[in-house]
Amino acid sequence: MSTEQHNETPRGRGRLVSLEPRRRAANRLEEHLVSLLAPHSADAERYRMLRNDVETFRKNDNLQVLAVTSPLAGDGKTTTAINLAASLAQSTAARVLLADVDLRRPSVARQVGLDGSRHSLVDALVGPGLTLEDMVEQLPQFNLSVLQAGEAADTTYELLKSSRLKELVDEARRRYDYIVLDTPPFVPVPDGRLITKCADGVLVVLAANRTPRGALAEALSLIDPAKIVGLVFNGDDSPTSSSYYGGYVASPPRPWWRHLWRSS
Ligand SMILES: Nc1ncnc2c1ncn2[C@@H]1O[C@H](COP(=O)(O)OP(=O)(O)OP(=O)(O)O)[C@@H](O)[C@H]1O
Ligand SMILES: [Mg+2]
């Protein structure tokens, strides 16, 4: 990726950021919350760079709800969503909600060590009486609120298609400064298309050296280009990954990702 390729996206300049493979940590919480538990680590600094961009989008473009997605399963969406939300929450003034909207393979609650005793997003999608207050859990010791997905008995598509999801996101907009949505993979299942309708921006995670180009191209053809705020190379341990590099064009209908790949 050439550092010269800087162009304007509809909401400003898009970004490409690389994240090194996570280091092994003593326990699960440490491993996933480097942004809080190891705030001086190189990994935490990378997420802080991402945070800085999101804060800028918030200020300049009023971006408040950010969906984290990827083309395929296992690319690193949840890892990125947790660490980005935790990084944003390092500002004590920021009210940050991390919401697990992956109803097919929910993992946020498990990864942050919540026991699932509170009401979940699924509970609220099937029953109209619940408010965010009934569901959201504060991560102990941290300034981070978490909404767990829960177990979907119904088809997830029907649940997400209802107007209830938008109502809940709108309620979250009134209560929080930043809402980070962890989502299912974009290509194999349709859920992401519904979820991103409620988001102001979409962050696309790629597993470095693993996500196929075709899958990325397909995902990008399905996501509203005006909403894409950046790409994250997760697990990139190349020498150039120690710093931010590159920007990209997101001016539809130009197939801007081809430029990205041609120069990589
Ligand atoms: N940068 C990384 N370094 C090392 N391991 C990672 C990294 N990112 C993710 N992993 C590991 O890869 C696996 C998948 O990561 P994660 O759950 O974040 O992906 P996902 O895209 O959310 O997956 P799914 O599509 O199943 O929801 C997990 O076991 C996670 O611990
Ligand atoms: Mg996940």
Image (spheres, rainbow, N blue to C red):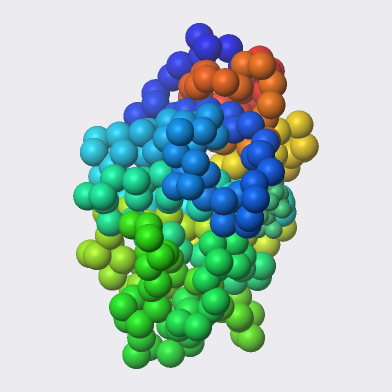
Question: In front: 137, or 215?
Answer: 137
Query: Is residue 92 rendered to the left or right of residue 87?
Result: left
Residue 225 can be seen, yes or no? no
Could you say where residue 214 lies in the image, as x and y percent from the top left? 75, 38
Could you say where residue 33 lies in the image, as x and y percent from the top left? 52, 50
| 238 over 223 or under it: above or below | above
Q: What residue is rendered at 47% in x and 58% in y?
A: 181
Question: In front: 39, or 94?
Answer: 39
Q: Quadrant of the N terminus?
A: top right
Query: Is residue 221 rendered to the left or right of residue 228?
Result: right
Could you say where residue 163 lies in the image, as x and y percent from the top left? 40, 76
Q: What residue is rendered at 77% in x and 37% in y?
A: 210
Question: In front: 50, or 253?
Answer: 50
Could you say where residue 172 lies in the image, as x and y percent from the top left? 31, 66
Give the quarter of the image for residue 165.
Answer: bottom left
| 113 over 185 or under it: above or below | below
Q: What residue is rendered at 52% in x and 44% in y?
A: 34
Give the quarter of the image for residue 143.
Answer: bottom left
